[in-house]
Image: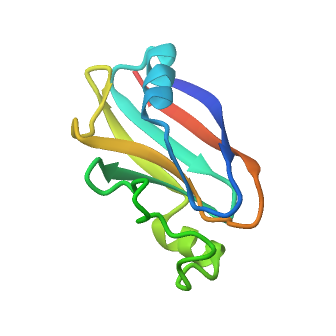
Amino acid sequence: MKVFHKDLKVTTLAGEISWNDITEQVREALLESSVTEGVCVIQTAHATCSVTIIDETQTPNEGGTNPTKDNDQAITCPHTVACHIGYSETVIVRNGALNINSTCYLHAIDFDLDSDSERTFSIMIMGA
């Protein structure tokens, strides 16, 4: 069984929840790993960050649906929000591809509104 590791660096901005589509970077890591059957785990060690699969119709847009420090009182504890969404996502690898719907994307999210940051999201791919 092969085990492959790669870290992604994501820059996040103060004053807004940072939503970063990392689907292509994960697909590139999968190709680099040469695993065709197995699992892919994406994880963050940052307490205010999450990883999730989101359908394209659910992603925040520029029209103001993305809560910011100024417009949403519900975003008061980024650690709690990140904990509810989760710090990792596991995706099955089948026939050399991520087993997710064509309208779904992997997102790295940072709920910390207080500072610009560079966050690390780790990828581990295991299989044959």
Name the quadrant containing residue 47: bottom right
Q: Nearer the viewer, residue 80 or 36?
A: 80
Residue 78 in the image, given as x and y percentages of width and height: 63, 73
Farthest residue, direction front: 63
Tally of numbered discs: 0
Instruction: Say if residue 1 shows up in the picture.
Output: no
Name the quadrant containing residue 73: bottom right
Q: Is residue 87 left or right of residue 55?
A: right
Instruction: Say if residue 124 shows up in the picture.
Output: yes
Residue 112 in the image, given as x and y percentages of width and height: 68, 65
Q: Is residue 38 left or right of residue 19?
A: left
Q: Is residue 2 left or right of residue 49?
A: left
Q: Nearer the viewer, residue 116 or 51?
A: 116
Q: Which scheme is used to colour this image of the protein?
A: rainbow
Assign the C terminus to one quadrant of the image.
Answer: top left
Residue at x 54%, y 77% (from the top left corner): 71
Q: Is residue 91 left or right of residue 101?
A: right
Q: Is residue 45 above or below residue 65?
A: above
Residue 86 in the image, given as x and y percentages of width and height: 50, 63
Residue at x 32%, y 20% (from the top left corner): 96
Residue at x 57%, y 25% (from the top left corner): 4
Q: Is residue 78 above or below residue 92?
A: below
Q: Is residue 65 above or below residue 29?
A: below
Residue at x 33%, y 38% (from the top left corner): 92
